[in-house]
Image (spheres, rainbow, N blue to C red):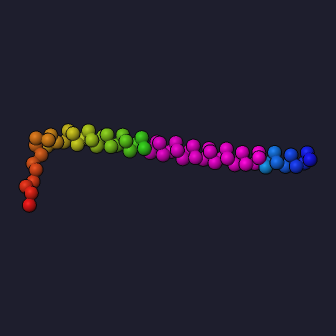
Amino acid sequence: MESIDAARIEALETKVSYLEQTLQQLSDVLYRQQQALDRVIARNQQLVDELGTAPGASASEIEIPPHY
């Protein structure tokens, strides 16, 4: 009976070990994706700022083309 319990415990420990490894890998991927997203958001803000300071950027200076 004890050998069955020991085998079950060992199997559970093995599964937990794999789950911990997978969790760490997912955490690493999530961290890298968040870094990439932060860079994209910063670049987007930079482009919005540049667009706002570009000549002809105000709404009153934009000429609307006539409809066909």
Span of residues in magenta? 12-36
Q: Is residue 59 above or below residue 66?
A: above
Residue 16 inside the magenta-drawn segment = yes
Residue extending farthest right: 1
Q: Residue at x 52, y 42 (%)?
A: 31
Q: Residue at x 21, y 39 (%)?
A: 52
Q: Tell me which residue sits at (88%, 49%) in the image.
A: 4
Extreme residue in the front direction: 1
Q: Quadrant of the C terminus?
A: bottom left
| Coordinates of residue 60 in the picture (x, y in percent) | 10, 41
**Residue 51 belongs to the span the image colors magenta:** no
In percent of the image, x 28 and y 43: which residue is there? 47
Tell me which secondary structure the magenta stretch mostly adopts. Answer: helix
Horizontal side, residue 58 vs residue 21: left or right: left
In the image, residue 63 lies at what x, y percent?
A: 9, 48
Give left or right: position of 66 versus 3.
left
Q: How many marks?
A: 0
- Quarter of the view holding residue 36: top left
The x, y position of residue 2, in whole percent, is: 91, 45
Residue 35: percent from the left, percent from the top?
A: 46, 42
Q: Nearer the viewer, residue 47 or 7?
A: 7
